[in-house]
Amino acid sequence: MSYSLLVCEIGPIFHFVRRSRKAKDYWAASFLFSYLMCQIAKFVKHYGVIIRPNLEGDLMCNDTLRGERKVKAGSIPDQIYVVIPAEKKEEVKCRLKKEFERILEEIIRDVKEKNGMNSVYVDMNEVHEYFNLFFIFHSIKASYPSYDEFVEAEEKIKARSLTYCFTRQNRPGVKKWDKCDLCGERAQVYTVNHTATDLTDRERICSVCILKRFLYKAVEAIASEPKYESTSDIAAVPINRRYSELKNKPDVEANLKAVEDKYDRLVSWCRTNTSELFDVENTIKFSEPLGRCLFVESPLLKEFRDSFKKLEEKDGSLPTPWLERPFYAVVYMDGDNMGSAFKDSGKYFKEVSNTVSSVLTKFTHKAEDIVSQHSGQLIYAGGDDVNFMIHPEYLTGCVEELANTYRQLFAEGVAQSGDNLPQSIKEKLLNLSLSTGAVVCYHKYPLSEAIKRSYQTLTDKAKKVKGKNAIAVQLIKGHTETFTVAIPNALLKNVAMMKERIADGTISRTTPYRLREEEHLLDQLLMADPEKFKKYLSAELETTRGKKRDKKEVGAIVEVLKEIALVEDNSGKFSARTMIDVLLYLQFLTGRR
Ligand SMILES: [Zn+2]
């Protein structure tokens, strides 16, 4: 029997996902692609065997496996590889495009029905024109491709999807005032009125973007509702968490009541004066993850904040640095060196593929829980990719746990493979790691821009750290003040220690600024002799005013600072600047100016 490798790819993912205004658009845009791919997988399964990704353990695709549980985010990548008998090729070719069109029509129908929007006219031509399913066939010799055959197929599909380009932006026929507010391209077919009185406070949505703004209700049977609707909700998380902690303490009761009263007043003010609460119908309690009122311009805001600070004082806890500083983060994580692990697999290609697939399936399930435990919102977890939104306070803790879990699961997978794999390949798998790019920005900073920059930070900064296995964070404080720090994951623990030293005043507020003024000298010392560099730093730290510090404590800090300063990029360059920027970033996190 002769076989053919069918590769299907869906697009344009990043183009669609990026054009999001609210946290829930972002979640839905990503979910949609996984959902569409899942339907395609269900169809092609009738013709052959899906060899990548491993959908056996996927909760989105397996109703019985999922049981009562709902999925938190999309999990199917944009490509699937299927081995089919060569004689089925023509039939698949004939039916696949039609099937994809049917799937799109079905989801549009569900979205309209479930949202009570049956009278809305959706232009199906625009939908079909925008979403694309590409596929290629590649003849293979056996029922499983060799590595070379796999790569050839990969190149074919890459070439195929490159032929699709976006020439349809700035459609000449669409008037400016008629354009969709999410994509800015197509004409609106639906208007969301946020308030009944203010007619300018509305959003226009086109035939394609309707699928992200209103997707949730159409998939609610299998997906749990995204926790946060807007970026302001994410910015409020540490305040809600602090409140939940304090709620259970006996001696804060009287002050608790004051906070709740002030909050209720703030909410009713928001209801009559702003559109911030437009999607919330019922009374909202303070413990709910809603931040839209907590950062709105209101004469009542100061009252609320004062009462909250009093509550913290009464408890004797340090004030949360986030009460007056609304920020959120967008995070992209991606596996390092995956390609090279396969490249060297030779005749063990199938075994390596199976080991990697089963590890990644386990990782995807764990990632869901880890992101939730750190109060984040998962956007996507599938293959070796994870994408989520989180409050900056919990960012590095969450990333560290995900990166450690990834490595640990590979160690377990390799141990279970026993004698099936040679030692050299096992070592490759044990060295697989996860890198991260993140953007931390103000809650009103455009989400679409944050998404774009976060992905760029991953590819242009984290992946450029020598040896990868790194995290890069871009902090956007104002529209002008921006910098990026990039360090190996291995240093995250030390960085957490340094954050504490900044919070308790061991490293003074002025230290990073003074070091910045001496950046040139520090670089020279670093280049000449790292020991001299350390001595210089010790003197600098010991002599600053403030807390009394002992030599041992300073020594430990200086050692970490030196390690950070010596972090190399992939061309072998290092600089004291890395250390200074890490200090400035930590200073931002602790709320000290
Ligand atoms: Zn649109």
Image: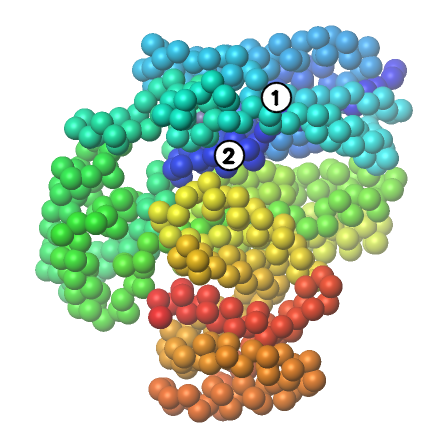
Q: Residue, x 67% and y 57% (percent of image)?
A: 464
Asked if residue 584 lies left or right of residue 296, the reply is right
Position above or below: 347 against 541: above
Amino acid type assigned to the residue bearing label 1 in the image: Asn
* CA distance separating discs 2 and 1: 14 Å
Q: Earlier in the sequence, mark 2 or mark 1?
A: 2
**On screen, 526 above or below 387?**
below
Please, what secondary structure does the residue beneath circle 1 have? strand
The location of residue 363, given as percent across then percent down, is 59, 44
Asked whether residue 407 appears in the rendered view, the answer is: no
- In the rendered image, which residue does mark 1 sit on? 132
Residue 451 in the image, given as x and y percentages of width and height: 50, 44
The quarter of the image that holds ligand 1 is: top left
Task: In this rendered view, identify the residue nearer to me: 354 or 259.
Answer: 259
The image shows residue 202, relative to residue 593, as above or below, that is above
Mark 1, other Cα within 10 Å: few <14 / some 14–19 / many ≥20: some
Which residue, given by chain and number where applicable, does mark 2 sit on?
A: 17
Question: Element under label 2?
Answer: helix
Which x, y percent locates residue 573?
69, 69
Q: Residue at x 75, y 21 (%)?
A: 136
Percent from the top left, x then y, of residue 410? 67, 50
Quadrant of the image containing the C terminus: bottom left
